[in-house]
Image (tube, coloured by chain):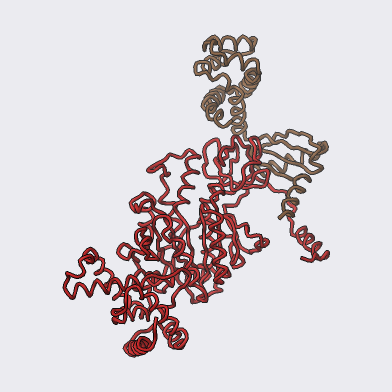
Chain colours: A brown, B red
Amino acid sequence: MSELTTAARPYARAVFEMAKEAGELDSWSESLGFMGAIAANEEVAKLLDTPKMAKQAGADAFIQLADGKLDEKAKNLVKTLAENNRIALLPEISALFEVLKDEAEGSVEAIVTTAKKLTKAEEKSIAAALKKRLGREVKLKVSIDKALLGGAIIQAGDLVIDGSIQGRLNKMTMAMAG
Amino acid sequence: MQLNPTEISDLIKKRIDSFEMDAEARTEGTIVSIMDGIVRIHGLSDVMSGEMIEFSNGTFGLALNLERDSVGAVVLGDYKNITEGDTAKCTGRILDVPVGPELLGRVVDSLGAPIDGKGPVETSQMGPIERQAPGVIDRQSVDEPMETGIKALDSMVPVGRGQRELIIGDRQTGKTAVAIDAIINQKGKDVKCIYVAVGQKASSVAAVVRKLEEFGAMEYTIVVAANASDPASMQYLAPYAGCAMGEYFRDRGENALIIYDDLTKQAWAYRQVSLLLRRPPGREAYPGDVFFLHSRLLERSSRVNADYVERMTNGEVKGKTGSLTAYPIIETQEGDVSAFVATNVISITDGQIFLDTDLFNSGNRPAIDAGLSVSRVGGSAQTTIIKKLGGGVRLDLAQYRELAAFSQFASDLDEGTRKQLERGERVTALMNQPQYSPLSTAELGFTLFAANEGFLDDIDVSKISAFEAAMLAHLRSDHEDFLNEINESGDYNDEIADKMRGILESFKSTSTW
């Protein structure tokens, strides 16, 4: 996982800088997401892996799969990746691009996991509190996990705030077991 | 044990009351790979170097390699229940161990957890494993003796409180025996002892603990054990944990003695951890910082002045200096003191006690090579009486060594040379000492006096130890007051010399051995 990140970083940076200069962050984001989804597909991954698939042939096959949804620059990106045999990195490149984009826009994505569905007001108050704490715009994503029993777990990047009842029970078990 | 129901509920109630219910915010990461006790974690963006990381099964790890996209950590404990994909959390704590007087008498592992089955250790303080040694201004020069009770050492290679003295020798030459005798001799001297066993057999450590208990030394000793079957990370950390426990006493104006048995195995463990972390290997495959591994450990053994102690205790303890004396042990192969780790530690310590296999095998035990052993603190760490009487012994042995080759031609030599040889033989025999029988300052003084004044010259070499044993028995029974007097003051003058001469003359004329 981390080795892929290291390999994907230069590409993601290059695309990001290009997109920033041209002011096309959102369209690139969409494009990359799309390409990442294709590359992540099992069949495609297997196809790209076969040694017989010469580099440019692989690039052409990929572009065909994208069914005309890629503009010139995106096609060039695929060809560049193919030269270094790195098409399989597209999901990582997309993820890193999102991180860079969020940083540039001063926003961060937070995943809130609760046992029961949150009301709109609750979501707003969590978002506001997080914004104060992290100092950036917060994009909230909500998910439900009944095993938490109550409370919430908030994940923002690597930071995890565990306010769930299950988490506290676990802590108590550890403390009792001494 | 009778279980009192209310007691149990109280305990639980106390635990629940003190339990903090805040939601905690920590950085988390995912384990990418786990191999040979080394865990690679992706994420953990806020991790600090040397921070404790908690894994989902409750074991801890130590973050050693902070790389751009991953963190390399060693697992401090059993890694069988950790799987790839598990979460790892930062704890915000740099690795620390429990410290305090509650640890005395206990056997603990490198993290301070008890392994002697005598219940939990309830300390109130934690001390960091890695800490800066006291600076130049905070130190005080070494001038108090740290007596080992071993004749050869206290007379010729004296160690002071706050000094580092290396015990170096091949396997089975009595290195641990010297260290254990030093601990046993600290009984009643208000010195706390710490014995750190690194990579030893658990049976050896158990035997040491039993011996210490037998001589009543366990009540002022902490044993930190990372045995041969413990993970390399624990073996690497054990000396630092012991040092942190010793620093607690040093910083409170008390005196402590720590024995690292042995640092060779700690260097091996560190080499294993470094190689698995893919750090580049250097000479003998050790990592580049193996010198720093030992130097930063041994620098923390020092004598600190009263100002430092006052500062560290927030004004509680005034006017007392503290010290932490270290006896690191290094095992050599075939007497090779020019091996890498051996030369490193020799250059770090303030002297060495060199134990020789040939001397050991020919019956001279402790097998101390008086020529190669040295103490760089020397005379300033000796009581007056030993300083005055010890010089003669050292000279006799040095001259004897020079002439030893000629001892085969004993009948063809001149009077003076023969006398020197005979004196040397007797002094060598006198320096032999059985295990676990330390000598006090006064008793050593008498022994040295007897050697210097020629009381041994007419006794057969094979009967020297019998003579000495009889003499000590006589002194202990008939002249206890005089012995105590010498022990208290440590003085030596003509009056005392005359008195000693008188006692010895009367003993020699009236007793048999």
Of the 4 image quadrants, the one containing the N terminus of chain A is top right
Q: Position of residue B216 (x, y in %)?
A: 56, 72
Residue at 53% of width from left, 47% of height from top? B232
**Residue A58 appearing in the image:** yes
Query: In x, y percent, where is residue B382?
Result: 37, 75
* Residue situated in front as seen by the camera: B311 or B374: B374
Which of B71 and B506 lies nearest the eye of the viewer? B506
- Residue A95 as seen in the image, left or right of residue B482: right
Q: How many labels does the image show?
A: 0
**On the image, which quarter does residue B432 sit in?**
bottom left
Residue B390 located left or right of residue B257:
left
From the viewer's perspective, is residue B105 above or below residue B330? Answer: below
Image vertical order of residue B23 relative to residue B194, above or below: above
In the displayed structure image, the side of residue B409 where residue B295 appears, left or right: right
The location of residue B194, given as percent across then percent down, is 52, 64
Q: Report x, y in % for residue A22.
A: 56, 22
In this view, the residue in front, B456 or B355, is B456
Picture quadrant where residue A67 is located: top right
Residue found 21% across the figure and 73% down from its top: B418
Which of the image's four quarters has the C terminus of chain A?
bottom right
Residue A135 appears in the figure:
no
